[in-house]
Image (spheres, rainbow, N blue to C red):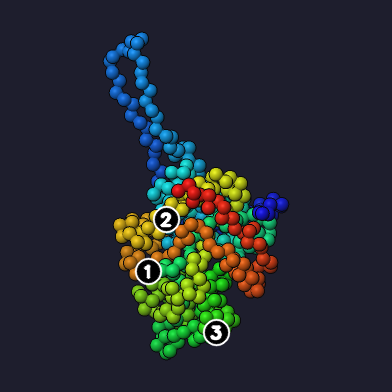
């Protein structure tokens, strides 16, 4: 059961406070795909023959109607500038959203989930895609009806795009295991995301707790330099920054990476998700159409992981849509996993919420059936 929004004033206030921050963040980074003009069929050449009364023209069968640009329903989605957004990027550039009658505009912004979620709740943005954060639970606790409708980026066997690394100097001094991180300064992109639970499990594998390390919050793009100049001793690295730090700069050495992490946290560990508010939730055909287009893009991406020609095409799409332009980096890095069917084990959210509560990031937990509804993406999968 999804809770209803009881106080419109709360929503309007939240949206008003955050709108200016979001719009400021969008300046100069909004990306749209050029929209092709609908093709007008050329009528058959006229003849000089005058039909007689006995001549009955044979009707020409009409092809199935395809939504034109004017007919397509416009929707705006906030996405991150990350390779795990590939399903959305591909769906736009390959026309998969257009095939289901949608004209989707992807907006990039530095706004935090806490800033963006209220805008999704009141329909100023239609969808939000990004890291699963405590802000989602806090919004629910404030009566803001936002729901995860699909899992997106995930740690999957063979495609684990996270790594835990220490500086090259420390590695040479013998710091080579999780147990050796006790008392060390460790960089994280957030202390209120689902990857905090991942870190907790990784530390536990070496007999440590979150309190045994000195956590320092640093933006992902800044982590390679922070490791190189010794500002931090260790870091949770996310691709492509893991490859930049370990292979290109030689500033760090992984101590836990790849499928080692899967053995600790389990396969298909959710990292990011697609979130919607009441305007989309209350239009099931529209939302399922969007998710059908997204799933087609996600599956095209998964095909690229195995097929070189498809991979080259996806690389070009990612170069068009993200700041990652280096062909060599695409060759070296571990490509992110993506949930194939748009679902994940929701018990991870129960664990994450308890951790967030213990760390003071949320006041109370929310039943997962109020946070997640996978029926939309499951129905969308049947349309493919």
Q: Is residue 55 visible?
A: yes
Q: Earlier in the sequence, mark 2 or mark 1?
A: 2
Q: Secondary structure at mark 1?
A: loop
List x then y, in percent, for residue 92: 43, 50
Q: Which mark is residue 13?
A: none
Q: Is residue 315 visible?
A: no
Q: Secondary structure at mark 3?
A: loop
Mark nearest the camera among 2 and 1 is 2
Residue lying at 36% horizontally and 21% vertically, measured from the top left: 58
Residue lying at 33% horizontally and 67% vertically, measured from the top left: 331
Residue lying at 48% horizontally and 75% vertically, measured from the top left: 263
Q: Earlier in the sequence, mark 2 or mark 3?
A: 3
How far apart, in angstroms, are the residues tagged by discs 2 and 1?
Answer: 20 Å
Disc 3 crowd rating (10 Å Cα; few below 14, some 14-19, many 20+) is few
How far apart, in angstroms, are the residues tagged by discs 3 and 1?
Answer: 29 Å
Image quadrant occupied by the N terminus:
bottom right
Marks 2/1 in contact by CB < 8 Å: the verdict is no
Q: Is residue 63 above or below residue 165?
A: above
Determine which residue is flagged by label 1. Answer: 333
Q: Earlier in the sequence, mark 3 or mark 1?
A: 3
List x then y, in percent, for residue 121: 61, 53
Disc 1 crowd rating (10 Å Cα; few below 14, some 14-19, many 20+) is some
Mark nearest the camera among 3 and 1 is 3
Residue farthest bottom in this picture: 173
Q: Nearer the viewer, residue 195 or 322?
A: 195
List x then y, in percent, for residue 282: 61, 46
> Count of labels shown?
3
Q: Secondary structure at mark 2?
A: helix
Residue lying at 69% horizontally and 66% vertically, measured from the top left: 364
Q: Which mark is residue 299?
A: 2
Determine which residue is flagged by label 3. Answer: 207
């Amino acid at each position: 059961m999804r809770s209803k929004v009881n106080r419109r004033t709360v929503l309007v206030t939240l949206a008003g406070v955050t709108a200016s921050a979001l719009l400021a963040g969008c300046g100069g980074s909004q990306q749209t795909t050029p929209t092709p003009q609908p093709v007008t069929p050329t009528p058959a050449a006229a003849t000089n023959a005058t039909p007689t009364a006995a001549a009955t023209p044979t009707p020409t069968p009409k092809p199935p109607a395809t939504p034109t640009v004017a007919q397509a329903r416009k929707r705006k989605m906030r996405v991150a500038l990350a390779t795990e957004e590939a399903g959305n990027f591909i769906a736009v550039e390959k026309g998969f959203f257009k095939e289901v009658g949608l004209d989707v505009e992807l907006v990039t912004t530095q706004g935090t989930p806490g800033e963006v979620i209220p805008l999704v709740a009141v329909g100023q943005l239609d969808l939000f895609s990004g890291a699963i954060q405590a802000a989602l639970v806090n919004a629910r606790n404030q009566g803001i009806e936002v729901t995860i409708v699909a899992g997106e980026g995930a740690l999957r066997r063979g495609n684990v795009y996270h790594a835990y690394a220490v500086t090259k100097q420390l590695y040479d001094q013998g710091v080579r295991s999780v147990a050796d991180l006790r008392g060390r300064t460790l960089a994280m992109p957030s202390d209120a995301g689902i990857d905090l639970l991942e870190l907790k499990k990784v530390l536990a594998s070496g007999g440590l707790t979150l309190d045994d390390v000195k956590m320092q919050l640093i933006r992902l793009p800044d982590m390679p330099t922070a490791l190189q100049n010794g500002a931090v001793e260790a870091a949770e690295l996310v691709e492509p920054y893991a490859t930049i730090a370990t292979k290109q700069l030689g500033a760090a050495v992984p101590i836990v990476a790849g499928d080692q992490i899967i053995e600790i946290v389990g396969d298909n560990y959710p990292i990011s998700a697609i979130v919607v508010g009441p305007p989309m939730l209350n239009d099931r055909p529209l939302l399922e159409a969007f998710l059908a287009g997204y799933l087609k893009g996600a599956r095209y991406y998964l095909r690229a992981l195995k097929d070189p020609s498809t991979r080259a095409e996806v690389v070009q799409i990612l170069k068009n849509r993200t700041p990652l332009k280096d062909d060599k980096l695409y060759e070296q890095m571990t490509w992110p996993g993506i949930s194939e069917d748009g679902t994940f084990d929701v018990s991870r959210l129960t664990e994450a919420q308890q951790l967030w509560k213990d760390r003071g990031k949320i006041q109370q937990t929310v039943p997962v059936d109020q946070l997640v509804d996978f029926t939309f993406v499951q129905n969308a999968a049947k349309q493919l």
